[in-house]
Image: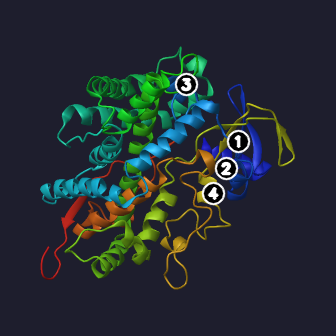
Amino acid sequence: MHLQYLQISKKYGPVCTVYFGSRPTIVVTGYQALKEVFTDYGDTFLNRGSMPVFDRLFKFEGLSFSNGDTWRQLRQFTMQTLRDFGMGRKSLEDPILEEAHHIVKHFRSLKEEPFEPSTTLTCASSNIIAKILTGTRFGYNDKEWMEILRKSHKAFHIISSVWGQLYDLFPTIMNCLPGPHRNIFTLLAPLEDELMKTIKLHQETLDPACPRDYIDCFLIRMRQEEKNVGVKTPFTVINLKASIYDMFLGGTESTAVTVNYGYLILIKHPELQEKIHEEIDQVIGQAREPRGEDRSQMPYMNALVHEIQRYSDIFPLGFARATSRDITFHGYNIPKGTNVFPMLTTALRDPAHFETPGEFNIKHFLDENDKFKKNNAFLPFAAGKRACIAESLVRLQLFLFFTITLQKFTLKSMVDPKDLDISPTESGIENVPPARKIIFIPRTIEGGA
C-alpha cells in the first residue's frame, strides 16, 4: 500500500488524508514534513495511533502501544533500566561480540555449504534482547525456541502481505473471513506464552537485593508501587508482558532482517566486500576483535551499515501516531485523536537528500574525501520522544555483526550477482527480504586465517 500512498502524495502534497476502511488517516511524506511531526510538533503527534493487528496483540498496553502517563512512566523506567544494563555503554559490546562469535562458529561449521541464514540471524538478534530482558541465551540448535522464532517471523510475513494489509483496513470484516490473516495471532501465541513462563519463573526466584535483568527490575518496581494504596500504576504484570513482548518482536525482527538484507546486498555487490575487507585489515586486522570505537576509523564500513539500513527500508510505513490535540498543520485542521502515518520510507528515499534514492549507493554517507558524513534524512528509527528506545543498541549490533562477519568471511552468491533478485517478497508494514542461500567462505589472510 505504501507505493499507492506515494502516488497520492505526489498529487496532493506531503500531507493528505487517506481512508483506511472507514478510518481517516493523515499520511505524511518527505523529510521536512516528517521532521515537523517527530520534533517541531512532537508533543502534538506523540500518541500511538490505531493499528488493528497490534491493537489486538497488545490491547493498548506496554511500552510502545500505550499513551499518556502510562507510556511516559514506562518509557522513563525502561530507558533508565536499559542504561543500567549497559545500553549506550562500552560494556554492552561484550554480549554482542559473544553472539557474533557464535555466528562465526556456526558459519564455519557449514564448510562452505550454501545456507539460508534468516532463522539463525533471528535467534542471534533475539539473544541480545534476551540477555538484557530475561538474562538468558538460546542455542541455534534449540529446536523449541527456533520454532517459536520461525513462527513469529512467519507472522510478520503475513502482516506485511495483502492479507495483513486488508486486516488493517477492514478488521471487523476480516475477523469473520477465512484466510492466512487468521494465523497471525496463533503464530505469535507461543512467544507470548514463553515470555509469561519466564515472568512467572522470575517471580518465584526474585531477589530484590540483586536484580538480574529487566524483568527483575520491573518486578521490584511493582512491589514498591504496591505500597501506594489507591494510586493507579502502570507497573503491572500485564504491562510487563506487553513491554518485553514488544521489545522482543521489534528488536529481534528489525535487526535480523536488516542483517539478512545486508548479506544479500553484499553478495549482490561483491565489489563492496573488497573495499570493506581492505579497511578491516588496515584498521583491525585479524588478530583482534572489532570494537564500537573502531567506527570512527572505518568510514566505509560505517557508511555501508547506514546505506544498508536506508536501502533495506525495513519499516516503510513507520508506526501510526495520533494527534493529542486539535492542530492546524500545513493549512489543514486535524482533530484530536486522528491517526497519522509518518512514512519513514519517504525520508530514507527523499531525492532532496539522497542523490540516487532508489539505488544502493554507499556514497550517500561519504563525502568527497571518503570520510563518513551524516544525513539528517536518515530516519530508520524515527525521531523525537517516540523514537526507537534501543537505537544505540541496534546501531552497535549492526556495526559489530557486519564487521566481524566480513573480518572472517567472504560472502558469495549461488548465482551470478547480476542475476540475483533481492527485491522484497512482501512489502507492507515490513519489507520482507527473499530467502536466498549464501556461501560463507572463510578468509585466508597472509600469515593465517
Q: Secondary structure at mark 3?
A: loop
Query: Which residue is painted at 49% across and 21% down in the image?
Result: 227
* Distance between the alpha carbons at the discs numbered 3 and 4: 37 Å
Residue 254 shows in the view: no
Disc 3 packing (10 Å; few <14; some 14–19; many ≥20): some
Q: Secondary structure at mark 1?
A: loop
Residue under numbered circle 4: 347
Q: Which residue is nearer to you in this view: 89 or 438?
A: 89
Is tag 4's residue or tag 1's residue first in the polypeptide sequence? 1
Is tag 1's residue or tag 2's residue first in the polypeptide sequence? 2
Whether residue 293 is situated above or below residue 26 in the rendered picture: below
Q: Secondary structure at mark 4?
A: helix
Disc 4 packing (10 Å; few <14; some 14–19; many ≥20): many
Residue under numbered circle 3: 233
* Distance between the alpha carbons at the discs numbered 2 and 4: 12 Å
Tag 4: residue type? Ala
